[in-house]
Amino acid sequence: MPGDNATPVAPGAAVSFPSTAAATAGIDRQSETAFTLTEAGTYLVLFQVSVTEAGQLQLALNDVAQPQTVVGRSTRTSQIVGMSIITAPAGGVLTVINPAGSTEDLTITPTAGGTESVSAHLVILRLA
């Protein structure tokens, strides 16, 4: 994470996940911020991101914010963690965004809680 997410995430913008640790068939990295779900289906999406500010994150599918996926925190003492089940069409593009109605940018924190690097995680699993 250090240096990879140096730019704050503006309201309406997507969070960057700059590295791929593992990838499976049917989920293609389109960019650092967007992932194509090549098969129609139901997906479990998990993410966690350390940020400096209190704030919210949400999933967007094909650039449409999914209101049932909003998660957040009101203090600066923990990560923002999300877990949602969504139904997507074949070719759907998934992103994790700072909701458009947010009032401030979110700063990704590469060394949350200490001196060791932390990472943001995004896990996408096709259920059916």
Image (cartoon, rainbow, N blue to C red):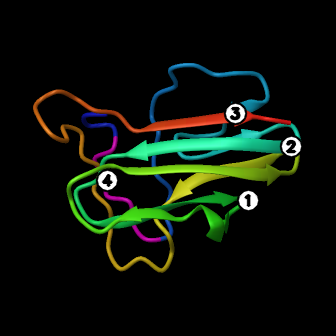
Residue at 15% across / 40% down in the picture? 113
Residue at 32% across / 62% down in the picture? 106
The percent coordinates of residue 82 (x first, y second) are: 51, 51
- Residue 102 falls left or right of residue 35: left
Task: Give the number of the mark in front: 3 or 1.
Answer: 3
* Residue placed under numbered mark 1 in the picture: 62
Say if 83 sits above or below 32 in the image. Answer: below
Q: Which amino acid does label 3 sit on?
A: Leu
Q: What element carries label 4?
A: loop
Q: Around disc 3, counting alpha carbons within 10 Å, would you say few (fewer than 14), some (14 to 19), or many (20 or more)?
A: some
The percent coordinates of residue 12 (x first, y second) are: 50, 69
Q: Earlier in the sequence, mark 2 or mark 1?
A: 2
Q: Earlier in the sequence, mark 3 or mark 2?
A: 2
Task: Give the number of the mark in front: 4 or 3.
Answer: 3
Q: Is mark 2 on a helix, strand or loop?
A: strand
Q: Does the magenta stretch include residue 83?
A: no
Say if 44 sits above or below 57 in the image. Answer: above
Task: Give the number of the mark in front: 1 or 4.
Answer: 1
Task: Give the number of the mark in front: 2 or 1.
Answer: 2
In depth, the one of 2 and 121 nearer the eye is: 121
Write the start and end of the magenta stretch as one range. 5-11
What's the CA distance linking mark 2 and mark 1? Answer: 14 Å
Q: Earlier in the sequence, mark 4 or mark 3?
A: 4
Q: Is mark 1 on a helix, strand or loop?
A: loop
The percent coordinates of residue 86 (x first, y second) are: 74, 52
* Residue placed under numbered mark 2 in the picture: 41
Q: Earlier in the sequence, mark 3 or mark 1?
A: 1
